[in-house]
Amino acid sequence: MSSASARLLFHSAGRIGIVRADGSECRALPLDVPGQTRWQSGPQFRDESGRRVMLLFSHGTSRTADLVRGALLRRVWVYEHDSGALRELFAGSRPAPWIGVSAVTDAGRRAIVCAIVDGEQRLYSADLATERCEPLTEPGSGFHYGESLSPDGLRLACHVTGGKDRAHRAPPHMPAPYSINVIELATGRRTLVAGRSGNLYFGPVWSPDGETLAFLDCESGRDPAHFWADVCVADADGSSLRRVTEGQAHWFATSHGTAEARGGGSNSVAWVPQRTTSGRGRIVWTPKLPGSRPDVRYDASRADHEEFVFAPEEARGGTHLQLLDPQSGEGTDLTEPEAGRWDFRVSFASDGRRFAFCRTRPGRAPVLWVGDREQGIANPVTAGFDGAGADFPVWLAADEEEEEA
């Protein structure tokens, strides 16, 4: 399969779209389930029979506050790439109304399930055949999310906030809100990787060799909107924590789109799948131009989760994409910086050469682009559906497996 024929998934107007890397054959997945108005894509894998499947999540119309509280019924589905068959998981037995699956292990037999229970997002290990969920985290241990499964499938990294013991003290694994933890799946043993007062550590991702974690550090006391952050790395055993960038230069809390169709979500870092000729890994991040501000302003007087006020006329600067050497701190531009243009949300193909990303301008819906870092080119692929733009791109694993075969 050629590079242009590889397909990507994306989110747009509550639907999951699929498009070829050259922009052709763009359509929405035919997911016709009554009452389900918002769909998201999840982990992709092969099951024991060799079928190429993907997990999907869906829910009906909701308010942000209902989502955060876990008061919304969120459904989990198995979707077969080849046939389009759709089957619901956890329909009869689930730990809470709001659940999701962050990773699939053991050749499609088990999954890491997250569920919001009593105001905490707890983690479970689930047998997908019996749908039985066994707890990985205990009540009072905090709100766990941003999960990332290690390459060997044995450890889970995440950030955790909000945990307190019976004496209302923070547990050892969370010395400050938003600490980075690594959890061994077989034993539940935790390792504290990063946690310090005044630092919001967020979104850990594993290096390809499974030895290092990259994540963000937002100085939330000075930036309550969480617009900006720096890139950090640490060994997975909790040693060698250091900040690679300075000046809170990474675009963290994205907000984009038109007044009628707003989008957003945390913009994390990613590792390039392939190492360089020197054997050193690279991280892709989203640095800003000096003096940048997005197309919203933060108003702390507004209701929780509604603090962003649409103000495209106040936007300044922009962002671009850069490859970062975590050892030297040196960066190489992946896209060129340009005032008024905001690039974000990178997804690399498994070859480490092709990458998908979103590009927007103040007050406009984001467009999905695909680039080739060897050729130094990037082209627009799709603007999504109904004027909502295209966001959260991910390469379709089934196509990548065919290319490598």
Image (cartoon, rainbow, N blue to C red):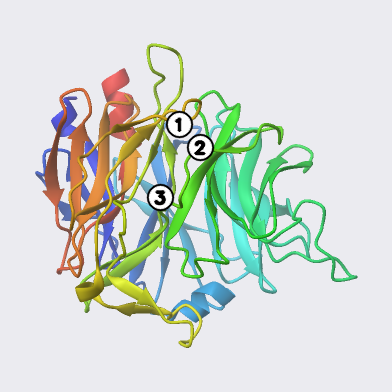
Mark 3: amino acid = His
- As rendered, which of 194 and 2 lies closer to the eye? 194
Quadrant where the N terminus sits is: top left
- Tell me the residue at 44%/49% (across/down): 268
Three-letter amino acid code at disc 1? Gly
Quadrant in which the C terminus appears: top left
Nearest-to-viewer mark from 1 and 3? 1
Residue 35 visible in this rendered orientation of the protein: no
Lower position in the chain sequence, tag 3 or tag 2: 2
Q: Amino acid at mark 2?
A: Val
Q: Is residue 351 above or below residue 357?
A: above
Q: Where is 251 relative to 313, above or below?
A: above
Marks 1 and 2 close (CB-CB < 8 Å): yes
**Could you tell me which residue is drawn at 33 percent across and 41 percent down?**
347
Judging from the image, what secondary structure is the residue with disc 2 in? loop
Residue at x 28% of width, y 78% of height = 310
Mark 2: few/some/many CA within 10 Å (<14, 14-19, 20+): some
Image mark for residue 362: none
Q: Which residue is mark 2?
A: 244
Quarter of the rendering containing residue 279: top left
Residue sitting nearer the eye, 273 or 230: 230
Report if residue 176 is visible in the image: yes
Precedes in sequence: disc 1 or disc 2: 2
**Quarter holding residue 243:** top right
| Residue at mark 3 to residue at mark 2: CA–CA distance | 11 Å
Q: Secondary structure at mark 3?
A: strand
Residue lying farthest to the right in this orientation: 167
Q: Alpha-carbon neighbours of circle 3 within 10 Å: few (<14), some, or many (≥20)?
A: many
Picture coordinates of residue 330, whole percent (x, y): 40, 29
The residue that label 1 is drawn on is 329
Residue that numbered label 3 is attached to: 250
